[in-house]
Amino acid sequence: MLRYTRNYRLHNVASSLILKRTAIIPSLQGLRRGNFSQDDTTNLNNKKRRKRKVTSISLDDLNSVNLKKVNTKELEFKVRQLKEFTKNLKAQIKRSESRNEKRETEDDIDLEEINKDADSVFENLSNHERRKNHKVQNHLGIPIGNSQNQSTNLSSLILGSSLEQAQKFLPSTLVTRLNDNNLVLKCLTDKTRQNWNPIIKSISKNREGLNGIGKNKLNSTLLSSVKGLYFDNIERLDKMLLEYVDNDITKFTTEMYLSLFENLSNIKLTDPNMSNEVIVKMKELLERYDEALIKGTDTKMTQYILNNGIKFASKLNNHEHMEYFLTKFKGYGIIPNRINYTTVLQYYIRMGISKKSWDIFDTMKFLSKEHAPDLIAYNSVLTLCSRDKDYSKALDIYNEMVNSGINPGTSTRTIMAKILAIASRDSFTSEGKSESLRLLGWKFIHEIIETTGSKLSHKSLESMIALAAYDGDVGMSRALYHCYVTTKYRNVVQNWVGKRDYVKIWKSVLDPRMLNYLFLAYSNYNSNKLPLLLGYEQGILLRRNIINSVDYSGRSEFDDDLGVLLPFLPVTEIKHNWELLAESRAIWHFNLEYGGSTSLRSTSESIVDKSTIMTAVENSKTIDDFKWNIFSKIHELKSQTINTDVLNSIVLNTYLTIPIKLHDKKEFVLRLKEFTFQQHDFDSKIESFYLESNNKMVEDNDKNSSSPSTSEDTSIELAEDPNDLLAHYILSLKHKILANCSTYELTMKAASKFNDIKLATEAWEERGKFRKSSSFQKLAQNNRMESDTKFAELMVAFFSSQKMYTDALHVVMSSKRYIDWKYPMVKNLHRGLLEIEDSRSIDILLDIVNRKSKVQTIEETISSLTL
């Protein structure tokens, strides 16, 4: 006799408390002894089991479980995590079903019909003897001479099935004209990657084109679905649509305009000339509509059609094209909708036109509810606040968004955290509240983690490392950078198709922004300052979990072939300056060399050698042509051996700032000389070589005419050494960038930090030569003035710190004509003059600082005359 016992216990699966019932079935005595017969087993199976009534479960049965002890927040987080998992699982199932549907359709065989046909064949073959007395039949059991009326063979079933599937995507008329069901199914079955280009091209080859198809059918099955057309196929579609309306433009419908505009606006701009062709085509369509209006068309222009125009103009960053489409709204009497306003808003933000951006945003707020800003619009203006480092306005926008009922998502909180991090960079932008802003930024990060769990986006990681970097939290910054690089490397390698190209892999993995924040953390490190996250419990837990999740030794990374070892010191916390300098140099080289795939020290003589240089000389008519040819060779050299995405002035300046902040003058000078070169130095070497080469070529020609027997030896002797020197110099520039205004400003700051008059003098002289170069002269006038003003201010600050007040005052006096000196710029100089009681110099300085502009003088004169 079987005996059942039941008990209930709590089982935690995927964060849900689930009642789990277990059934305990004791073995029979015979089974335990092992001496049972087959009859005993048969009797056991045939014996009717006694049913036991199972009562329903109520909350009273759970007395042994204290549910109140469950953390409510943790339970809510687990529920949200389970919902997110369910959502992702549904998406995966949907994608899998789409792929399965594609495979089944591409087989062009209806399995159900095939089974029916196979059953028919089997029945005919098995009854072969019975069918002998009937009239002659073929091998499928189908009477010869009457096959179409009696049954359907396998080929007709396949064709019928593919025809039925093709008619799901196109009108039956078009399917018949195409006469290629396989093409239709191949191009349109996968709805996520439909390719309409072969379809439109094939339809255009038919004389009938789109004629004979009802308007409703045309709109629902073709015009509303066709997407991703190339420009030539858009032209074909437009031509067929004109033929469809018998070239009567008054019958050209709204759906036709919308389909053409949508495909035009989504064209990928691989060729610069293509953008002009697209704009011309859009204007041509609008001119066609204007002409149709004059003729009395009933077709209505819509906001959605014109939105494609402003979207494409926004993509081009072209103000003239944008204004053209905006005036069309007024011309047609169309009020822009929310989508139109948002597109224009994003365009102005991208172009850096802050005033117009805020005007558009305010207009959206004070129009109807249909025009009220949505989440996209709010996120767009928050990026504008980030650019302006205006954290107070960003907080106002965020609170306004919450009060209007819009739920700020992960992207919004990420932007807010980034804004607060950037605003905390110094006491001026943070208004003396740097730590408070970072603390508020971490609050947004905690909200993101509570919502999404441990799965953080790239933008969220960037905001986190920005907060840690400005706080000088090296331990957190290193861990975040390590997590980002290793995770992205694994994802890229796992999805890589074909033979692995590690240069391309690392180019997509290494992010210069993340590297810049890591270097910023190194430069802001202060051993006497406690990281902000260690000041409260939630921050301590977050920091500990992230740092402990990283294995700097790399042992856990090589469980498979996807592991990568970054050049970090095998410690969780760095405490010494020399460790920061060594690790920053290693990370910098690792990024420049594509993770070790290339080498800074390798020579690329195949790109630059003697013959290459002489060819450049012979092909250059002027010195400028020769410079251009050499620059192109340097660019080619860099692109093949160095990660040029990382080698830029922003990251390099942050890299150079590290030894300045850590008081290591020798390391700064080494880094400066190793990774920068001077424009005037490059010009002098190139010009002297070019002139010398031309002179030698002339001399060689003269010697060839006088003594041809010795001309060859002389030519080799003269051309050897200069070529070698220039080739080595060019090769040394492959990992260097041209020193610019910010480089000289940083050098002057270093001179002030190290109290080095020689370094300051060199920076002053080098920048004086740089001002005469073409690189500086090509800058806009306001940029040149801004750079001159900043460098002069740094010079005054340096001389004042060295108590060289006469030199500092001389800088102010010599530049007063083109620099508008303000008191904060010369405050230290004024204080120094007060200490030595130099009243004459004080009067001169204050006279320059307090002088009025010509406009102010004229205005005061006019006001005095009026009085």
Image: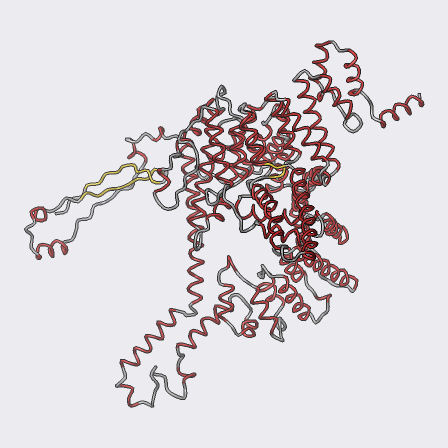
Image quadrant containing the C terminus: top right
Residue 150 x %, y %: 40, 83
Residue at coordinates 71% horizontally, 66% vertically from top-left?
A: 251
Q: Is residue 480 above or below residue 202?
A: above
| Horizontal arrangement in the rendering, residue 332 relative to residue 188 (left or right) | right
How many marks can you see?
0
Residue 348 x %, y %: 68, 42
Residue at coordinates 60% horizontally, 32% vertically from top-left?
A: 399
In the depicted view, which residue is nearer to us: 436 or 469?
Answer: 469
Can residue 713 be seen in the rendering of this structure? yes
Can residue 439 be seen in the rendering of this structure? no
Residue 648 x %, y %: 59, 39
Residue at coordinates 9% horizontally, 46% vertically from top-left?
A: 32
Protein image colouring = secondary structure
In the depicted view, which residue is nearer to us: 27 or 242?
Answer: 242
Q: Is residue 458 above or below residue 841?
A: below
In the depicted view, which residue is nearer to us: 245 or 206?
Answer: 206
| Horizontal arrangement in the rendering, residue 594 relative to residue 41 (left or right) | right
Image quadrant in which you'd find residue 195: bottom right
In the depicted view, which residue is nearer to us: 446 or 785?
Answer: 785
Residue 177 x %, y %: 56, 74
| Horizontal arrangement in the rendering, residue 700 relative to residue 500 (left or right) | right
